[in-house]
Image (cartoon, grey):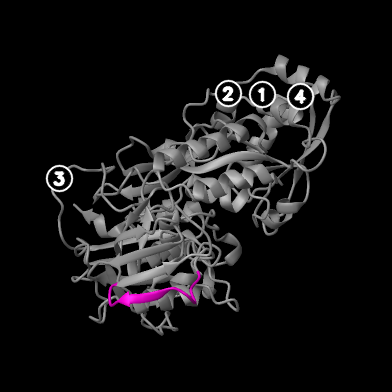
Amino acid sequence: MNDERFPGLHRRGFLAATTGAATALALAGCGGSGDTATSDGAPRRGGRLRAAFAGGGASETLDPHLASLFADAARAKALFDKLADYGADLSARPRLAERWEPNKTLDRWQVTLRKAVFHDGKPVTAEDVLYSYRRIADPKQAFRAKASLEPIDLDASRATGERSIEFVLKRPTAEFPNVLAAFGAYVVPDNATEFDDRPIGSGPFRFVSFAPGRSAVFRRFDDHWDGAPLLDEIEFVVANEESARVGALLGGQVEYAHELNPTTARAHEGGGQIEIVRLRNSAMQAFCMKTDRAPFDDKRVREAFFLIADRQELVDGALSGAGEVGNDLFGKGYEYYAADLPQRTQDLDRARALLKQAGAENLEVTLDTSAVAAGFTEAAGIFRDQAAKAGVTIEVRMGSKDSYWSDILDGGTLCCYRSGAMPVEAHISQRLLTDSTTNATKWRHKDFDALYQQAQSTRDRTERAAVYGRMQRRLYTEGGFLVWGFADWIIGTSRKVKGVEAKAPANTLDWARFDRVWLA
């Protein structure tokens, strides 16, 4: 990207590519086009769309297996494909996989690939898939999807034809399609090792140029299996500060600005100059209680904290109203979410009574927070004031943005927490089993683990949903996540940008779906 085409970005220093300014992708990860945010007018072919994202500096790479930032994920989605991806409800939808079928014991899955080709014209084959998955699973590497692929026995799995694969699993896994849709589980050509010079994928756009920390340009791939994009080209521009992305959008230097804050959205919504797109249910907002240590090793104290929270006040104050209230469970609106449980509301009298029963009157607790995520410091202050009304003294402790996520996994007793979109099943397996590696609430119960194994070995979806419902009812009653809200993810676009999907939580297939976007 030269300075003459983007003088404003250069002049204001909008492209300062410092790693510390990059926004980390919330942990997570289909097909199909729903209602669009701007659906007026017939789709039009042609043009280049410039999209501004926070980036990762000079260390950026186009290796899709190393994707960790939103910018990485958007670029990877343009160049590469996965076997499956997540729909708006976080259920797995076929992509490169045309279909999948388990055996009766759910420990072997036959996957058939659709007819697709890479950018060099070579067909996508079973060997490409197996090479990609084995590369991701390399114990010497730290590829993002490695943990997600763990259920697969890749030594025993094999190609049964050019476009068919038998995946052998280490244990019965009813939700195996979620593995295929895992964040970062992209298919690359057999033996591919270099990606930054001229990467070859099977995605809707093909490589033109890449300047790490600055710009990437991709061109329409006419032979994409899902149809050629309408755009001629997509350019990803790095602008780390939110004010830079907004300024570039208002100045006409980009047509799409990712990750805007609620204040910006309110200022411009309905104003006519730019469009504001709100991706609902994109980020869970919570307080995390450590259930293995005082005072939260007493479930009466945890229930009291559930009842102290005024969720609407937290959404209004910490998210500037850009979200909706939670009900102490992850995944509102997602597949298997227990929507039948009554909405919990503030009840200070009941909270005081529970604290008294637990011998925790005049309780003093430290709440860890940080400016690492939008709304964290505001939520901590609001909850501190709410708790005071129940006789609880909360001391808010500010943590480092650089080490916050690692610090809170094991330390402290109460902390601010958030999560991006992922299936309810993945949230359970990654965070709520005895051996989960990111078990921030220290929720360890063998009978709960057994229910998860039962769900995973249950072939019938209705019966499986009933097991997940039992698990969620227990978490609702005595779990360690006080889920107070679900934040919108906010995107700004030029008024001439059409086809941006509004029903697409961040990390799902239709988020940053530039092959479906056009310029009016």
**Badge number at residue 41:** 3
Residue 129 placement (x, y as % from top left): 38, 74
The secondary structure making up most of the magenta span is: loop
Residue placed under numbered mark 4 in the picture: 388
Which residue type carries mark 1?
A: Leu
Residue 263 placement (x, y as % from top left): 49, 39
Instruction: Give the class, few, some or many, for how many residues have Cα within 10 Å of label 1's Cα (few <14, many ≥20).
Output: many
Sequence-earlier tag: 4 or 2: 2
Which residue type carries mark 4?
A: Ala
Sequence-earlier tag: 2 or 1: 1
Dividing the picture into quadrants, the one containing residue 185 is: bottom left
The answer to whether 467 is drawn above or below residue 82 in the figure is: above
Residue placed under numbered mark 2 in the picture: 344
Asked if residue 501 lies left or right of residue 304, the reply is: left
Is there CB contact under 8 Å for labels 2 and 1?
yes
The answer to whether 417 is drawn above or below residue 466 in the figure is: below
Judging from the image, what secondary structure is the residue with disc 4 in?
A: helix
The part of the chain drawn in magenta is: 153-163
Judging from the image, what secondary structure is the residue with disc 1 in?
A: helix
